[in-house]
Amino acid sequence: MFGHEFLPSPDWVTGSRPYAVALGALGAGAAYSSVRRFLNAPPTTNRHRIIADLLAGPGFFLSLDKRKKISLALVPLAGFAAGYVSISQLLPMSITFAMGRQTERTYEVDRVEQDEACRYAVYLRGMPFGRNPLCGLPEWFRISLEPGDTLFIKGTGSAVGIFVDTVRVSPK
């Protein structure tokens, strides 16, 4: 199973989106309050020394105060991403890993692009925000795909997702 791409099912993504956003919001709030608490620690504590070491650097363009403000803005984004991804992708991946069996699922092509990170990128409908495209498909296969085509994806799967082994297009 490792080494294969995982795709959560579109039904899972749609049904879990409110929970993923809620957990993402909780993660963002927790990250913000934790960083704020660390940054406001008295100068004599170990926490203050750790934060000073983390924020220390050449500081060519930014003062320590500006770096603190930037960290207060960016860390909640990381907290949101961690909460969102844990529900929308990691939970179905874990369920499929534990209970998966050989199966075939259908996915719909959203768009096909040539991307620098993934030479032959096939984006699927109903995937969670931030989900990378399906990569590694041969060029001859990718060229034959159009938006709206149905793909049959075979692999180890469950009702919440699938580890991709083979991909074939539905006959038109």
Image (cartoon, helix red, strand yellow):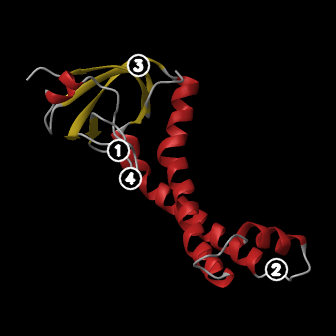
The tag earlier along the polypeptide, 1 or 2, is 2
User: Is disc 2 placed on a helix, strand or loop?
Assistant: loop
Residue that badge 1 annotates: 127
Crowd class of label 1 (few under 14; some 14 to 19; many from 20; radius 10 Å): many
Q: CA distance from mark 2 to mark 4?
A: 35 Å
Q: Number of marks in the image? A: 4
Q: CA distance from mark 1 to mark 2?
A: 41 Å
Residue receiving disc 3: 155
Q: Nearer the viewer, residue 98 or 121?
A: 121
C-alpha span from label 4 to label 1: 7 Å
Amino acid at circle 1: Met
Q: Are marks 4 and 1 in contact (CB under 8 Å)?
A: no
What is the x, y in percent for residue 39?
A: 74, 78
- The x and y percentages for residue 122 are 26, 36
Query: Image check: 12 left or right of 114?
Result: right
Identify the residue under disc 2: 41
Q: Are marks 4 and 3 in contact (CB under 8 Å)?
A: no
Q: SS for tag 4?
A: loop
Splitting the image into 4 quarters, where does residue 151 fall? top left
Residue at 90% of width from left, 76% of height from top? Answer: 45
Q: Are marks 1 and 3 in contact (CB under 8 Å)?
A: no
Identify residue for label 4: 129
**Disc 4 marks which amino acid?**
Phe
Q: Are marks 2 and 3 in contact (CB under 8 Å)?
A: no
Query: Residue 103 appears at what percent x and percent y?
Result: 39, 18
Residue depicted at 23% across the width and 36% down the height: 108
Please state which of the two labelled residues, at mark 2 or mark 3, is closer to the viewer: 2
Residue 83 shown left or right of residue 53 in the figure: left
